[in-house]
Image: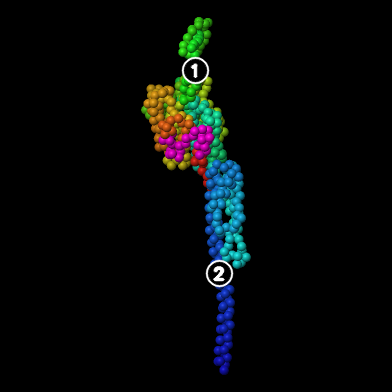
Amino acid sequence: MIRRQATERARRFWLDREGNIAIMFALTAMALVIMIGMAIDVNRLVKVRSEVQQSLDAAALAAAASRAQTARELKNVADPYLHANLASEDLTSGWTTQTEYRDDRIVHLAFTGGVKPLFAGMVGINRFDLHLEAEATRGVAQRIEAVLVLDNTYSMIERDSRSIRRIDALKSSASLLVNELMTNPSDEVSIGVVPYADYVNVGTNNRGASWLSVPNDYVLERTCDTRTYYTGSDPYVCTSIRDGVAETGICYRTIVATEVKVPPYRCDISYKWYGCVYSRNVGSLRLTDQSPNTPYRGFLTTSQSCLNAITPLTRSKSTVLAAIDNLIINVGGYKPETHIPSGMIWGVNVLSPTPPFQQGTNYDPANRRPRKILVLMTDGVNTMTYRPWDGAHVATDSPTERAATDTDLTSICTYAKTKKIELFTVGLNVPTKAGRTLLKTCATDDAHAFLAEDSAGLESAFREIARSIGVVRLVK
């Protein structure tokens, strides 16, 4: 009897336990489903968050790399990109972005939205909030040493269809480049300016420098007792060409010189150095910055024979902008022609760590630190030839002699490339196919060569160069 009662109690207990286990299993299974569902939702949240952040970063970089200059313009660049890349069904509708432009260099994007849960709604969570940010800065990411080799020959007086003089378009475009690269004074950016025409002006303040040989100024004292007067007859309209610029005036088929006796007077002739230098005429040194102890020769003249002086590398933006703004293309009757090799080699000299100018630091074989850049601008073709016995540059119409000058330019460009200098070339209304090919050959590659037909094209070229040199990078 007692055994039967014990067995019955055990059977009932077992039946009761099965019911408890079923209830416990159901509760445990539900909790497990919720945990697995939450894990899936969290995984989706992490995935969507990463996708949104990547799109936000890319949009900030795209906006910073654009030409937009206001928050509204930057938003117009970023928003289409975001809408195209954030069409995810996982995001709740109504997400928004805000765009700010901070300190005239930082593009800040802020995203506000949410992710739809699949399982979290079972515990009352209907949305996972997302608040993300991205910042991209405009500027330069490495030390830069750049020189602008700028044409200020007489042909720069010409005007485009909008009546803008070439020299004025150059000033505006080159200044734009400087402002883009030197936005932040803390950036390690140094820029120099080499104006060139038939000669380069190295600056009269360098007289006495070890890399320069200049004779003393002197006055040829004379006493004159005659004056010569000229009269012409049979006038006609004539045209003369100076550095590719046609000038129309009145000429005379007959000119009579009349010498008149006058009381004696002083007619001294003053010979002065205006900062102009010949090319070096020792071997091929005119084509490189090698042998810095072999000096350049300054020459004396009775009037101006070179224009603005070189501005060596400097981190002063105001100094560089002033050098550009003060560019001139002639002085009185001096209307210079074009000898591009002289501008090019002095551009190399400005970047070189050796004399003549020593503001440049040592070349980096990878051209990273510093990154040395030369921008060559011209509006025409070479019109002069090198005279080997003294290094002078002489105007010429000879195709053979002009071709020799072109070869000199190509040699200097090739030498600069061996130093890993990054070469940009900009041609403005270059009149010949050979001239355009010459500039393309000189540049680092096709992407570094620009041809412009007018002031708008010139500005676009310099803006593209600024974008190429400047580096946009994420800072947040």
Q: Position of residue 366 (x, y in %)?
A: 43, 42
* Residue at horizontal 53 percent and vertical 49 percent from the top: 58
> Main SS of the magenta segment?
helix
- Residue placed furthest toward the right: 124
Magenta segment: does it hold 324?
A: no
Report helix, strand or loop for mark 1: strand
Which disc, if any, is residue 328? none
| Residue numbers of the magenta segment | 439-464
* Residue at horizontal 55 percent and vertical 62 percent from the top: 42
What residue type is disc 1 on?
Answer: Val
* Residue at horizontal 60 percent and vertical 67 percent from the top: 122
Q: Position of residue 174 (x, y in %)?
A: 53, 34
Mark 1 or mark 2: name the one nearer the start of the chain: 2
Q: Can you tell which quarter of the image residue 320 is in?
A: top right
Residue 231, visible in the rendered structure: yes
Q: Position of residue 355 (x, y in %)?
A: 45, 31
Toward the viewer: 211 or 106? 106
Q: Which residue is mark 1?
A: 237
Magenta segment: does it hold 446?
A: yes
Q: Can you tell which quarter of the image residue 72 is in?
A: top right
Compared to residue 21, the image places residue 287 above or below, namely above
Which disc, if any, is residue 33? 2
Report helix, strand or loop for mark 2: helix
Cα–Cα gap, marks 1 and 2: 100 Å
- For the N terminus, the quadrant is bottom right
